[in-house]
Amino acid sequence: MTSVAVVRPEKLLKDLAAEWTQLGKAESEGDSRSAGVLRAVTMTMLVGVEAGEDERLALDALSQLMHEHPARAIILRLVANEAEALSGRAYATCWMPFGRRSQICCEQIELSAGANSFSEIPRLLRGLVAPDLPVVFWCRSAKVFAHASFEAIAELADKVILDSRAHPDPDTTVRAIDAQLRAGHLVGDITWTRLTRWRQTISAAFERADCRAFFDSLTRVEISYTHQPEPIAARYLRAWLQSILGARFPVVLTHLPDAESCSWQIRQVTFISPSSQLSIERPEKGMAEIHVADFHSRAHFESINEAELVRDEISILGRDPVFAKAAHLLSLSHS
């Protein structure tokens, strides 16, 4: 690993080249059972983090992502000391897949600065991103999102990934997402991605032939949530339902104070008609229950970790019109 006092892109790339040379030399002089080192870069992954726990969780997720999406990972670390000068280092991370004889190695660059120097990072990135490959900017930190340099970093990316649930003012974040989407930029929100299982379960109920008449006679939908303040995830789900059902009847949010100990935020979605109702409930982690009149069934409700959520967003490098419509409706409702 190499640290540099004056951060220059060409110096960091030179350090990476030296790292690969050293890895190749060590491999040739090492275990004869090994089949060598495979250098793998399919994209540039910019990761905006705050120093500390935020960074640790991001690196844990990144290590999982690298196995499926090998990348040149560039960590953009915002440190607590606002006056800390910009510093950087470059190195390689390697692993040997099960059943393989060759190591797979990815490139990693770290740029660290306090708030006063963080604005120097965008000009460095132009010389550090891997040429002719997609650039994804996963901004995990709300403070990095709020920094003045965020937009300049985002302009370098083919896609930006945020998590509005983790931001102190998620309504402002969603309005920013909507503005970027309408301007033609690709932006994803992990909060929306977490709703995939809810949307799949509801869509499956809509598609059942024996439920069509029920849904044609709907008069009201209730989304029951557990946490205060009103979670942005519940509002996203309401916006998605409104985008499908239109304005024929209300889609309302209700708080369940007795369920605030739940780690998940949406507890139940209930579709009400004059003669009956259908409800989808999460009574326990990893499980959903569907109730229609006297009929009850249970379904697996998979828990998805942060790495899997980011992976799902990375796999969508085109416009998602369903998300764009929901984000726009949500933005309008709180403008």
Image: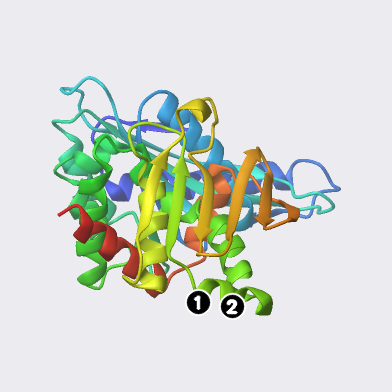
The quarter of the displayed image where residue 241 is located: bottom left
Q: Is residue 75 above or below residue 308?
A: above
Disc 2 marks a residue whose amino acid type is: Arg
Residue nearest the observer in this picture, 55 or 163: 163
Image point (57%, 68%), residue name: 203
Q: Is residue 1 left or right of residue 329?
A: right
Disc 1 marks a residue whose amino acid type is: Asp
Disc 1 target residue:
216
Residue nearest the observer in this picture, 320 or 239: 239
Which coloring applies here? rainbow
Indicate the position of residue 156 as horizontal and vertical percent values: 27, 60
Indicate the position of residue 124 as horizontal and vertical percent values: 24, 49
Image point (45%, 49%), residue name: 223
* Helix, strand or loop under label 1: helix
Q: Is residue 40 left or right of residue 331?
A: right
Q: Is residue 202 left or right of residue 140?
A: right
- Asked if residue 188 can be seen in this view, the reply is no
Indicate the position of residue 318 as horizontal and vertical percent values: 41, 74
Dot 2: within a 10 Å radius of its alpha carbon, few (fewer than 14), some, or many (20 or more) residues?
Answer: few
Indicate the position of residue 118 as horizontal and vertical percent values: 20, 37
Please say if the residues under marks 1 and 2 sit with CB atoms less than 8 Å apart.
Answer: yes
